[in-house]
């Protein structure tokens, strides 16, 4: 089932649930946030929590991990959360289904893809031509990692259908273990798995899909249009806290950032967290401002279109609200 079809079904069920749920927009001090996954890629969010930036803005943030774009959007649309942290492409899928109360992007957290190309063998002076004829373990179809992955391959002169053996039928949660067990010559992985594989000698990072694909609104905060209209002050305070955290992450040593967010990653060694933070920061993955830029919005849609996953082109101002980011800068 395609991402668009899943969003269509979830949109219907979400609206049905919402019609049965009582909305209480008045509780502006408490904000329920649903994150698509738990990841060091989202370090500024955890910094905003651990360093008290949300509290400074008078906000009590209740964070829930909803594991996957489909589930995160269902939670948002059914009023199970006030704000969702998820890929911007999901707002386009929902809008394309004719949502009466669309999900609107109002603050950007990450501005590049977060995956890395990992080779089974250590390669000196890697070039993308080295992948020709190989088996590449990619991400599932319809998601941003897969769309960015194929975009980068094509941009480097590789046809993912004819120049290599592309595997995309393995669930996201099993991709790393499949590679570790011997499947594929190359794999597309998020951190910290890529760094852990290097430490264990299972694979070696040879390039970054984030640096190769350019700036995109990869992970953003979005809320239903009605929520933003009725909770203008809350949205502004939330965005200001994120802006503070973004600045803090770029100013502090990676070791300090790692210590700040370690409570959110109990199973990951502190040195690995520090290494991942530095890697993401050095390649510009952490946005330095919550402002989602217009050119990045259209670059996102170009990547989706190239992958055959863009249901309709959406104007920047239709699904992007820059008011809050502009106020806090």
Image (cartoon, rainbow, N blue to C red):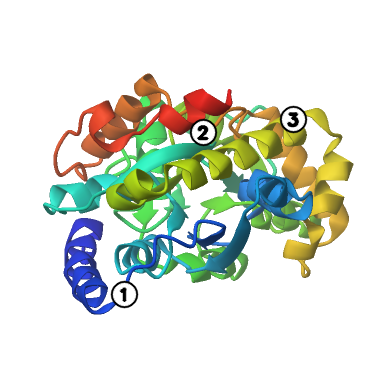
Nearer the observer, 2 or 186 = 2
Left or right of 250 on screen, residue 65: left
- Is residue 144 visible to the viewer in this orientation of the structure? yes
Left or right of 119 on screen, residue 232: left
Give the x, y percent position of residue 159. 30, 36
Residue in the image at 16% along x and 54% along y: 99
Q: CA distance from mark 1 to mark 3?
A: 40 Å
Q: CA distance from mark 1 to mark 2?
A: 35 Å
Kind of element beneath mark 3 = helix
Label 3 vs 2, first from the N-terminus? 2
Q: For label 3, count other residues whose C-alpha is less than 10 Å away and answer few (under 14), some (14-19) or many (20+).
A: some
The mark found on residue 250 in the picture is 3
Q: For label 2, count other residues whose C-alpha is less than 10 Å away and answer few (under 14), some (14-19) or many (20+).
A: many
Q: Nearer the viewer, mark 1 or mark 2?
A: 1
Q: Which residue is mark 1?
A: 22
Nearer the observer, 236 or 155 = 236
Q: Which residue is mark 2?
A: 111
Kind of element beneath mark 1 = loop
Give the x, y percent position of residue 279. 72, 37
Residue in the image at 44% along x and 52% along y: 86
The mark found on residue 132 in the picture is none
Is the residue under label 2 in contact with that under label 1 (CB below 8 Å)?
no
Give the x, y percent position of residue 235. 48, 44
């Amino acid at each position: 089932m395609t991402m668009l079809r899943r969003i269509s079904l979830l949109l219907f069920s979400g609206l049905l649930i919402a019609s049965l749920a009582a909305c209480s927009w008045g509780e502006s001090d408490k904000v329920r946030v649903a994150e698509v996954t738990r990841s060091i890629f989202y370090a500024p969010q955890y910094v905003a929590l651990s360093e008290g930036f949300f509290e400074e803005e008078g906000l009590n943030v209740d964070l829930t991990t909803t594991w996957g774009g489909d589930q995160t959007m269902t939670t948002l649309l059914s009023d199970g959360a006030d704000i969702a942290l998820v890929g911007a492409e999901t707002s386009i899928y929902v809008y394309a289904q004719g949502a009466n109360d669309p999900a609107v992007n109002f603050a950007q957290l990450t501005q590049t893809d977060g995956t890395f190309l990992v080779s089974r063998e250590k390669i000196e002076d890697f070039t993308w031509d080295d992948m020709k004829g190989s088996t590449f373990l990619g991400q599932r179809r319809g998601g941003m990692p897969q769309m960015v992955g194929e975009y980068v391959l094509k941009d480097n002169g590789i046809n993912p259908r004819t120049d290599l053996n592309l595997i995309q039928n393995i669930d996201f949660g099993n991709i790393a273990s499949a590679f570790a067990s011997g499947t594929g010559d190359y794999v597309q992985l998020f951190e910290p798995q890529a760094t852990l594989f290097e430490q264990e000698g299972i694979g070696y990072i040879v390039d970054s899909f984030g640096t190769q694909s350019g700036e995109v609104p990869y992970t953003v905060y979005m809320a239903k249009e009605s929520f933003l209209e009725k909770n203008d002050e809350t949205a502004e305070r939330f965005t200001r806290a994120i802006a503070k955290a973004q600045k803090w992450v770029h100013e502090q040593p990676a070791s300090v950032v790692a210590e700040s967010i370690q409570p959110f990653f109990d199973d990951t060694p502190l040195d690995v967290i520090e290494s991942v933070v530095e890697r993401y920061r050095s390649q510009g993955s952490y946005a330095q401002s919550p402002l989602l830029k217009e050119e990045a919005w259209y670059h996102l849609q170009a990547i989706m279109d190239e992958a055959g996953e863009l249901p309709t082109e959406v104007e920047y101002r239709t699904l992007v609200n820059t008011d809050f980011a502009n106020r806090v800068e």
